Amino acid sequence: MSNKAETNKGNLADPAAVAQAMASNAADPPTEPVVTETVPSAGMTAAVVRRPVCVVRLGRGRLGGSTLMDLYIQRARYQGRRVKPLDGDLRSRTLASLYPSRATDGSPILDGASAPRSEEMRDYKLWMEEEFRLMVEEAVSRVIDLGGGERVMQEFVRTFPLSRYCDSYGVDLLPIFMLGPDIEDLHHVVQIMRAGAVKSSRMLLVMNEGVIRSGQTTDGVFDGITKHPDFRALLDEGAKSVFLRKLDCLDVLRERRFGFYDAAYGRPDPSGNMAGPVLEFLTRIWLEDHEADQQTEGSAVWLP
């Protein structure tokens, strides 16, 4: 990721003033990353308004997919874009716990997570149809975590061609698959694609170093994946691949309910306490490394 300073997307500052402020603070670390887009507002041209994105996380469970979805939700919001989490994993309910739909006083929270009423297929269909309706009407991105529930999506798209729906209403469909070093993770992706669970010109393959077994080195651990003919075929078809490095302080961040960008760029946790230099540094380089991979691969513009 480039070493430019990022301004909060809610403030459309004068470019000259921003440049002056950047120059005066050039020696003050840490420096937040630049956001190159602006928040849609009255009078803006269509060229600077990003289309809503429908992210669908598929593939085997227990590969860090919920953490990745959380990262992309935080990234979008940090950069000033709305995104709503859809938690279809009713067993772990990770996104629902991280993004509650109601405050402690019972009042609704804007873009809080939603979930189906039950694991019955009928409830899943009603839930997704309603959320896809709102996604188009509100022009707000959705991030769907099915927690390995690709059978739900396969059944759903039999009667609701999601790819055609997104194309019809100006929504970018982005299936995301998590991969560990186990070759079966890749085989599972291939099976899902052959089954036609999602059809899109875009696909993101994320190799997560966080699931590597303790004591196992990361050097060459994904070679069996990246050198496999099926992996190369997916790339030839337009998929992009990135790495997600291990974040050693993830459990600490979760315990303190610390947002990634809050910890990395000097904002307090919900209790009002700062991260401190070590936690701040570890989180910031984790964000920077993943963003750099996304920028290099050209997949950053695919994200919500």
Image: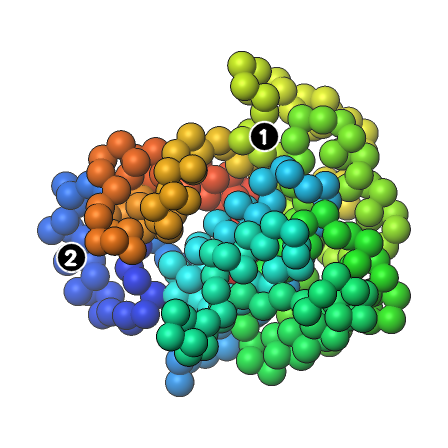
The percent coordinates of residue 269 (x first, y second) are 28, 51
| SS class, disc 1 | helix
User: 183 or 228: which is nearer to us?
Assistant: 183
Instruction: Say which quadrant the N terminus sits in.
Output: top left
* Label whose residue precedes the other's in the sequence (2 or 1): 2
Give the residue type at disc 1: Val
Is 171 situated left or right of 295 in this image?
A: right
Q: Residue at (61%, 79%) from the top-left corner?
A: 134
Give the image location of residue 41, x and y in percent: 40, 80
Drawn side of residue 192 relative to residue 242, left or right: right
Near mark 1 (Cα within 10 A), the count class, few <14, some 14-19 or many ≥20, is: some
- The residue indicated by pointer 2 is 21
Numbered disc in front, either 2 or 1: 1
* Residue 22 showing in the rendered view: yes
Mark 2 belongs to which amino acid?
Answer: Ala
Q: Which colouring convention does the figure follow?
A: rainbow
Residue located 34% across and 65% down the image = 9
Question: In which image quadrant can residue 74 be found?
Answer: bottom left
What is the crowding at mark 2: few (fewer than 14 residues within 10 Å), some, or many (at least 20)?
A: few
For the point 19% across and 65% down, which residue is it? Answer: 16
Corner quadrant of residue 184: top right
Q: Position of residue 152 (x, y in %)?
A: 79, 58
Residue positioned most to the left: 24
The residue pinned by badge 1 equals: 211
Furthest residue toward front: 105
Tag count: 2
Residue 209: which quarter of the image? top right
